[in-house]
Image (cartoon, rainbow, N blue to C red):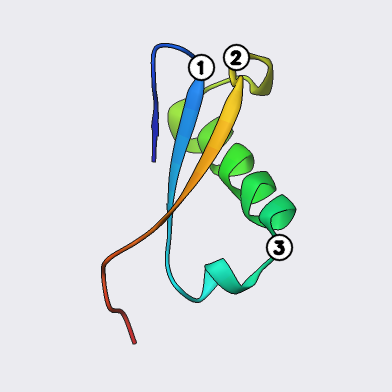
Amino acid sequence: MRLLNDGTLLVNLSSNFLRQSDEDAASYGLAVARKRLGVHVHAIKAVVLEASNSQQG
C-alpha cells in the first residue's frame, strides 16, 4: 500500500480479498492507510485496487 503525491491510494489485495465487493475493499484500504500511514481520509482523492501476485495459502 502506498499513497501517491496526487492523493491516489494504491492498495494491493490478495486473491482472497478480491472476492469482496469493491466498496468493501476500498473501505479496508482507507482504514489501513489511516492506521499504517497516518493519512487522513480527506487527503485521499482516489483508491486503486490491485491484485497481489503473491500466492499465500
Residue designated by label 1: 7
Q: Quadrant of residue 53?
A: bottom left
Q: Are marks 2 and 3 in contact (CB under 8 Å)?
A: no
Mark 1 secondary-structure assignment: loop
Left or right: 7, with 4 as reference point: right
Q: Are marks 1 and 2 in contact (CB under 8 Å)?
A: yes
Residue designated by label 3: 21
Above/below status of 16 relative to 36 = below
Give the spatial CA distance, label 2 vs label 3: 23 Å
Q: Nearer the viewer, residue 37 or 27?
A: 27
Left or right: 57, with 27 as reference point: left
Q: Earlier in the sequence, mark 1 or mark 3?
A: 1
Image coordinates of residue 50 in percent, x first then y, are 42, 52
Image coordinates of residue 19 in percent, x first then y, are 60, 74
Residue at left 39%, top 20%? 4
Total marks drawn?
A: 3
Q: Nearer the viewer, residue 14 or 39?
A: 14
Residue designated by label 2: 43
Mark 3 secondary-structure assignment: loop
Residue at left 66%, top 68%? 20
